[in-house]
């Protein structure tokens, strides 16, 4: 095979699949937490706001985890393609 676009397609497709699935999972989990919060607030339960450290940890963790998943997908795909 030559070095055409089809050699790189599994990398991009795998990374795109992980990104889309991660975004969908994030919004599904967020919706469930928001719905639970809405129901509890209707019942009169009081919530304290998140601390700055927790917000910062979330903001840093999501890009790091997505980057690691993309890198793992690229290397795993490369390892599988090299086996054949």
Image (spheres, rainbow, N blue to C red):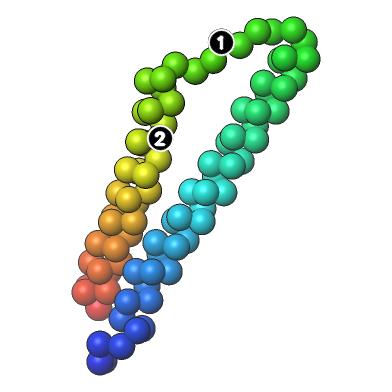
The CA distance from mark 2 to mark 1 is 19 Å
Residue extending farthest front: 52
Where in the figure is residue 33, as x and y percent of width and height?
62, 28
Does 74 sit above or below residue 47?
A: below
Where in the figure is residue 2, as x and y percent of width and height?
25, 92
The disc placed on residue 67 is none
Task: Give the position of the C terminus as an image quadrant.
Answer: bottom left
Name the residue at 32% across, 77% down: 8
- Name the residue nearer the viewer: 58 or 5: 58
Number of callouts = 2
Where in the figure is residue 6, as x and y percent of width and height?
36, 83
Name the residue at 49% across, 18% down: 50
Other-residue count near label 1 (Cα within 10 Å), few / some / many at <14 / 14–19 / ≥20: few
Identify the image quadrant of residue 79.
Answer: bottom left
User: In the displayed structure, does residue 12 sit left or right of residue 36?
Assistant: left
The disc placed on residue 48 is 1
Does 34 sit above or below residue 2?
A: above
User: In the displayed structure, does residue 42 sit left or right of residue 63?
Assistant: right
Task: Give the position of the N terminus as an image quadrant.
Answer: bottom left
- In the picture of the structure, the residue carrying the numbered disc 2 is 59
Please say if the residues under marks 2 and 1 sit with CB atoms less than 8 Å apart: no
- Name the residue nearer the viewer: 60 or 16: 60
Where in the figure is residue 69, as x and y percent of width and height?
34, 51
Other-residue count near label 2 (Cα within 10 Å), few / some / many at <14 / 14–19 / ≥20: few
- Name the residue nearer the viewer: 73 or 43: 43
User: In the displayed structure, does residue 43 sit left or right of residue 63?
Assistant: right
Q: Which mark sits nearer the N-terminus, 2 or 1?
A: 1
Does 47 sit above or below residue 57?
A: above
């Amino acid at each position: 095979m030559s070095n055409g676009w089809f050699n790189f397609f599994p990398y991009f497709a795998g990374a795109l699949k992980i990104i889309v699935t991660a975004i969908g999972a994030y919004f599904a989990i967020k919706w469930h937490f928001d719905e639970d919060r809405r129901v509890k607030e209707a019942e009169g339960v009081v919530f304290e706001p998140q601390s700055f450290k927790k917000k910062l940890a979330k903001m840093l963790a999501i890009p790091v985890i997505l980057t690691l998943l993309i890198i793992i997908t690229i290397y795993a795909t490369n390892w599988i393609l090299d086996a054949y």
